[in-house]
Amino acid sequence: MAIPVLMPRQGQSVETCILGEWVKKKGDTVKTGDILFSYETDKASFEEDAKTDGILLDIFFAEGDEVPVLVNVAVIGAVGESVDEFRPDSQAKSPEKDTQAAVAVAKTVSVPVLNTNFESSRKVKISPRAKNAAERVGIAYQHLQGSGPEGRIIERDIEAAAQMIPKLTPLAQEKAKAEGLKTGETTTGLGGKAIAKDLISYNQIYGDDFEVKKLSNMRKLIAKAMLTSLQNSAQLTHHMSADARKIMALRKKFKKAFDAGTVSQNITINDLVCFAVIKALKKYPQVNSHFIGDSMRWFNKVHLGLAVDTDRGLMVPAIKNAEDLSLEGLSAQLQAIAGQCRKGNVSPELLAPEAASFTISNLGNYGVEMFTPVINLPQTAILGVCTIVPRPKDLGDGVYGFVPMMGLSLTYDHQALDGGEATLFLKEIKEQIENLEI
Amino acid sequence: MSKIYDLAIIGGGPAGYVAAERAGAKGLSVLIFDMRSLGGVCLNEGCIPTKTLLNSVKVLEYAKEASKYGINVENISIDFKKIMLRKDKVVRKLVAGIGVKMKHVHAEVVMAKATIREKRGEVITIEADGQEYQANRLLVCSGSEAAVPPIPGLDITQILTNREILQLKEKPESLVIIGGGVIGTEFADFFNAMGTKVTVIEMLPEILTGVDEEIAAFVRKEFVKKGVEFHLKARVTKLNGKEVVFEKNGQEYKITGEQVLLSVGRKASVAGIGLENIGVEFTPRGVKIDQNCRTNVPNVYAAGDITGFSLLAHTASREGEVAVNHMLGRKDVMRYDAIPGVVYTHPEIAGVGLTESTAKEKGIEVEVKQLPMAYAGRFVAENEGKDGFCKVIVGKKYREILGIHMVGGACSEMIWGACAIIEAQLRVQDVEEIVFPHPTVSEIIKETIFQF
């Protein structure tokens, strides 16, 4: 027999709750104790679990709906059972609800949002009730500090914020928006409204002595990718340095050969490092991977990403199957793809963060001695290659000398890799560089 | 022990009596001094009596032009004495009304010249008629006097100011008006209509300084048609009794009037009230106030003409209210951006906000649109053979309404709407959404705004 699921009553004074999220969908099989949906009052959030086994035959309310308590929200039963008898009297209710919504829209006061165009990718914790209220009065809730559990924004936060916003005259609204001004402490207009004269610059030090530069799309993408990376992974960086005598000697040798015309490519230090890293990656396949929440992708081949600085911003193109290339081939491809990035005709597929399995960012040419590169998610690690500096080294037999050492900064996602693994991998790179044989 | 009032007010004009009314209504114990008559210059020798007289001009004009509307009026004659008596009646009635208002709010009225004696701690002592009064707060609104410039030969006993001219018993055959400002122009209108030969001598290139130049010129030309003589850019150099000597374009002219009206401006009445005894900061031009109408001395406020700027009754009343609101802790500040200016001549002039020339002086980029009053159907219906126009000034960048100026018809009665538009900083698109009653002359404002 089909059994209705009621919107529970949370406390005597609560008459309606907002349906948060449906965990189960219509048609799902549910077992007693399974969470069906979340819901909230203006003060707290709760979850409702199934009290019986069966199929979730129908759902009567959508996420965000305000549902009176003890009203049927869903029906659990066996396939083929009728749910109509449990359907709440929604026919009569919905038109009224629609009218209310229309009235609410009509009443919406246009309050200028005095924030910047900061488009946050972070998840804002806000109750549906508060969100409705915010949208009704035009409050940019993204920047509010919530007073609910875990900083969740609840309705009273929106009410408080609405109180704080001074009313602006139409001119003041337009001017504030156009010139990036905000209301000062004092308002001198009719009925306490802020008039154009009351608007002040965001900053009392420099006033409006700056130019607003719109972000290019590219910049927006980079910004989003970088912030997402730092917010959605557990990244940290280990630093180590490798004896660069061998690699420098190789570079010298190849340069001579190139000048003599015996090799087609002018092999650079970067090419050699990339070559060494590919070898290391083959020994630590867990680093040549993507971390995708509940699983990882371990790649069979190394698809090497290389950070390229261009006039338009940072690009990270991937070289497919990089491990199959000879040093000369790798060098040629790295050179070609960097060229394409700078010209702007690189294939977009190669720029996707998913395209590469591991990335190298080389700041050695700029004299950077160590840094903390940012992982290109969903990759699990990135190697920062630093400049070569002379460091004292025990050359054996109590002899110390200055040796050119190349800095290596490995940022890895601790979600995917542990410190030991990362260290061993970094040490492997060091050894590959120090003992590179071509 | 004598009573300490919550508020003492010196001057019962539009600043003082309005402040007394508001403060009394909020429960403050109020004491108000006036050395002449409640209502101040406005009620006794300014706004009200002149408007009463000018209404007789309006009625006369209607009578004369009645045939245009298909009404025949014959044997029109003017009874100057009766006109003046009616004016006195109106003034008496309104003055008495203020007295009643003061009673209503339990404000104590002392009809005597008040002098501030001292401020000891919070308590301010004021002396009037040999008696001392004490209050915790003071509002000074002693108003202004007709300015008397140092012109050689000027004998104040032989010529008139706004005060004396209103007491004339007989219509003068001729009147020379020194100063073509609002006061001079309104009296010119009245006496010209009465049949007096009126000559206006103005120092500047145009009459009615502060009014939109195009409107001022329009009115002047209307006046010339009616027989008023104007001498612009003319500087009075000497007076010999009622003979006025003036210089214009390097030439000297002499003109004698049966009466001579001096209306060259007004001067704040800062002397003789003891401001210096409690250290109130002031100059001969006026008392300095902040946006809450406070003077430099705590709990001492000033409002009205004594501040030396925007010498208008409605400015005064509003300043008085701002002062009282500040005393009562209500957030309120004095704004001068939307103070209307009205001249009750025929045709009437009403304007608020920036004019084209003030915008230019301030370096504000504006756009201007203008429409003849005939765009409003009601104007055409009611103003046979008359003319006028409306001019709207908007900011170039945001198209906010910065000024609305009108001439023609009864535009004084609709200017408050323009004030509200400017106070609220509405833009062209905002005003377009306002419903104006049809048919009214006020539609001209909307029509002109739709020109942008």
Image: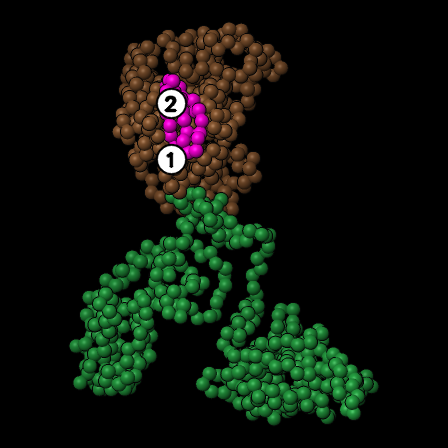
Chain colours: A green, B brown
Amino acid at circle 1: Val
Q: Residues within 10 Å of mark 2 (few under 14, many from 20)?
A: some
Residue A194 at what x, y percent from top left?
44, 47
Q: What residue is at 79 percent from the left and 88 percent from the top?
A: A399
Amino acid at circle 2: Glu
**Residue B314 visible within the image:** no
Q: What residue is at 51 percent from the left and 28 percent from the top?
A: B282
**Residue B205 visible within the image:** yes
* The disc label shown at residue B132, or none: 2
Residue holding disc 1: B324
Residue in the foreground of this view, choosing between B243 and B108:
B108
Q: Which residues are magenta?
A: B112-136
Q: CA distance from mark 1 to mark 2?
A: 23 Å
Q: What residue is at 24 percent from the left and 69 percent from the top?
A: A11
Where residue B313 sits, quadrant-wise, is top left
Residue A110 at what x, y percent from top left?
39, 54
Residue A228 at what x, y percent from top left?
51, 74
Vertical placement of B329 versus A243: above or below? above
Check chain identity for marks 1 and 2: say if they share one. Answer: yes
Q: What residue is at 53 percent from the left and 51 percent from the top?
A: A201
Q: Residues within 10 Å of mark 1 (few under 14, many from 20)?
A: many
